[in-house]
Structures are given as structure tokens and as C-alpha cells.
Image: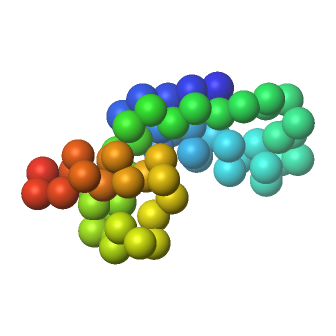
Amino acid sequence: MGGAGAGGWVLLGALFELIKRNNIDIIDSAFFISPIVDDAIGKVKEIDLLNWEKKWARYTTGFF
């Protein structure tokens, strides 16, 4: 499964629903491409971010 932008938010909801229904085993992987939660990453201290998140934090800082 995958989702970009707002689709990433929809993907997250779909995954939670699959977990709730005990059907998560039908998904092998999920890809979130620049989900709309980017504004939250820009507000986290860089030391608390994972390496892959640091790129997005730098991109979104000052944008949101």
C-alpha cells in the first residue's frame, strides 16, 4: 500500500482499520510519501528525529 500527501493520512487510517479487524497480514509493506503530517516533524528537535526524518524536518522548517 502507499499514499502521498493526504493519501498518506488515508493510508494510516486504513492500516489502523486493518489492525482493528485483525487483517493486517494481507499487507506486506506501506509507503508514506510526504504525508500531510510533515508540519509536526518540523517542530521536533533534530536530536529526537530518525535519520530519514531529518531531511523532511529541514524541508518543512519555516514552511508550516
Q: Residue at x 28, y 68 (%)?
A: 43
Vertical placement of residue 31 versus 61, above or below: above
Relative horizontal placement of residue 42, taking residue 20 as reference (left or right): left
Q: Residue at x 35, y 60 (%)?
A: 41
Q: In which quadrant of the rendered image does the C terminus lie?
A: bottom left
Is residue 7 among what the camera can see?
no
Residue 15: % across, % down: 68, 43
Q: Residue at x 30, y 55 (%)?
A: 57
Vertical placement of residue 24 versus 20, above or below: above
Q: How many marks?
A: 0
Is residue 58 among what the camera can see?
yes
Q: What is the quadrant of residue 48 in the picture?
A: bottom left
Residue 1: % across, % down: 64, 26
> Which residue is outermost to the left?
62
> Which residue is more in the foreground, 47 or 28?
47
> Which residue is more in the foreground, 23 or 48?
48
How are the colours assigned in the image?
Answer: rainbow
Residue 4: % across, % down: 42, 29
Relative horizontal placement of residue 45, taking residue 33 as reference (left or right): left
Q: Residue at x 28, y 60 (%)?
A: 42
Vertical placement of residue 23 versus 61, above or below: above
> Which residue is more in the foreground, 57 or 28?
57
